[in-house]
Image (spheres, rainbow, N blue to C red):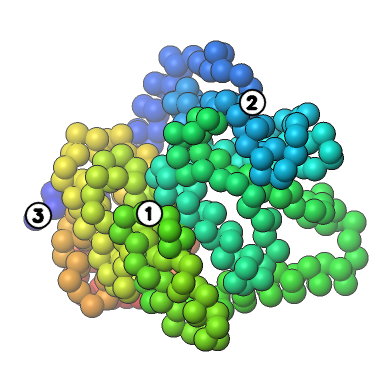
Amino acid sequence: MTLRRGVFIDITKLYHRRLLHMSRGSQSMPFQPLSDVHPLFSYTSGRWLWNEREQLEARCRRFDVASLQQAACQAVGAKKCVSLQKIGEGNYNKAYRLEMEDGQKVIAKIPHPNAGPQALTTASEVATMEFARTILDIPVPKVRAWSATDRNPVQAEYIIMEEAKGSQLHEVWDDLSLRTKCNIVREIVDIEKRLLSVSFDKLGSLYFQDSGITGCEPAIVTNGRQDVISRIKSRYCIGPITRREFWERQRSDMQYHGPWRSSTEYLDSVTRREMQWINQTPQQTNQIKYGYPYLICLFGILELYIWLFDKYLVRKYIATTIATVLYYAKATSTLRLPTKELSSYSNLASILGRCYKDPKKLVSLR
C-alpha cells in the first residue's frame, strides 16, 4: 500500500476546516429533546453539542416500574415498595433507590442501550462484583437479584443490590483531617493491591460458570493460595470482553472478542479487527466518532492508519508501536505519549511522516 504524496501537508488547516464545517452544520440542528419520555427513564444530567437526540436515545431506557418494584420486594423479602427514586445516572447506567414499607432500602441499576453488549455486560458485572466481594474481600454491595436479559417482566436488564453505607468522599473530603485523608488513601491502595493479587492465564471478562455465555473458558489462576484457586475455578470462567469498542457498529459481528492467552494475541486481535472494520465499511470513515481510529481519521490520514496495521502486524514490537498509537489516538487535546515530541497533533503527524520514510524510527516510540 502506498501513501499519497503530501499527506501530512497542511494537516492543521485540514483539521480546522473540519471543525468549521462541523460547527456550521450544527447551527441548523435545533435541540430535539425526548419530550415523550418520562424523566425517570431519560437522561437529564447534561446536553450535547452534536447529535443530541441520538445521544439522548442512547441513554434512555424504559422499563416497567411496577415489575421492578416487585422484583426488589422479592429480593429482600418485603411485601410492598413504597418509594422509587432516580438518584443518579452516568453515561452508561441509571441508579434508583427503592424503599420498602419495612424500611429496607436497595439500589437498582439499569444499563443504558450504549452500556455494552447485551447480556454480556450485566452478567460480567455481577460476576465481577461477587468475585470482588467474596474472593478479594473488598467491601462491594451484595447483589440481591439480577437479570442479564430484557425478556423479563421488568423489560430491561437490571441489578438489584444492597445500598452502600456512608457518605460520598467528594462531599466530605475538604472537612477531613490530614491523618484521616492519609488513612483513606492507604485503604484505596490496599484495595488496589487486592485487585492485583489474583492473576489469570487469559485476558477477557469474568463470568459465572453457569452463565451460559458462549466462548467462555475455565478461569485458571496463576498465583494465590490453593483454596482460593479452587474456589475461583469451580465458580468462575473467562469469556468475551465487554469493552464497548469491541462491539460498536459492525464490530459485534466480528470474531475478535476473546478471551486471549497473551497481551500479544490481544493486540493482534485489536489490529485485525480495526483493519477488517475499515475495509468493510469505507463509506463510514468520514463519520467515525468512537474507537481507536478517531484521531487519525480526524486528520484524514486513513491510509497511514491501515499502513501501520499492515506493516507492523507481525513485528515483535507490535505492543510498543501499534498499541501505543492506537491507545493514545483516543486523546482529544493532548497526546500523553512516552515522548515529549508527541505533545501536539502536528508533531505526531510529523513524526509518523518521518517513520514512514524510515520505518526503523518507529522503534524509538518504545
Q: Residue furthest left?
A: 1
Badge 2 amino acid: Ala
Is there a contact, CB below 8 Å, between mark 1 and mark 3?
no
- Residue drawn at (72%, 43%), measured in percent from left and top? 77
- Residue drawn at (81%, 72%), measured in percent from left and top? 183
Q: Measured along the vertical axis of the image, is residue 176 above or below residue 234? A: above
Q: Quadrant of the C terminus?
A: bottom left
- Residue drawn at (13%, 49%), measured in percent from left and top? 4
Badge 3 amino acid: Thr
Disc 1, SS: loop
Residue linked to disc 1 = 212
Residue 291: image location, x then y, percent: 36, 48
Q: Earlier in the sequence, mark 1 or mark 3?
A: 3
Q: Quadrant of the N terminus?
A: bottom left
Please tell me whether mark 3 or mark 2 is closer to you in this view.
2
Please tell me how many numbered marks the rendered image carries.
Answer: 3
Residue linked to disc 2 = 66
Q: Quadrant of residue 44?
A: top right
Q: Is residue 326 visible?
A: no
Disc 3, SS: loop
Residue linked to disc 3 = 2
Tell whether 260 sits left or right of 302: right
Around disc 2, counting alpha carbons within 10 Å, would you say few (fewer than 14), some (14 to 19), or many (20 or more)? few
Tell whether 177 sits left or right of 149: right
- How far apart in space, not on screen, are marks 1 and 3 (Cα)? 46 Å
- How far apart in space, not on screen, are marks 2 and 1 (Cα)? 28 Å
Residue 178: image location, x then y, percent: 87, 69
Badge 1 amino acid: Gly
Residue 288: image location, x then y, percent: 32, 39
Disc 2, SS: helix
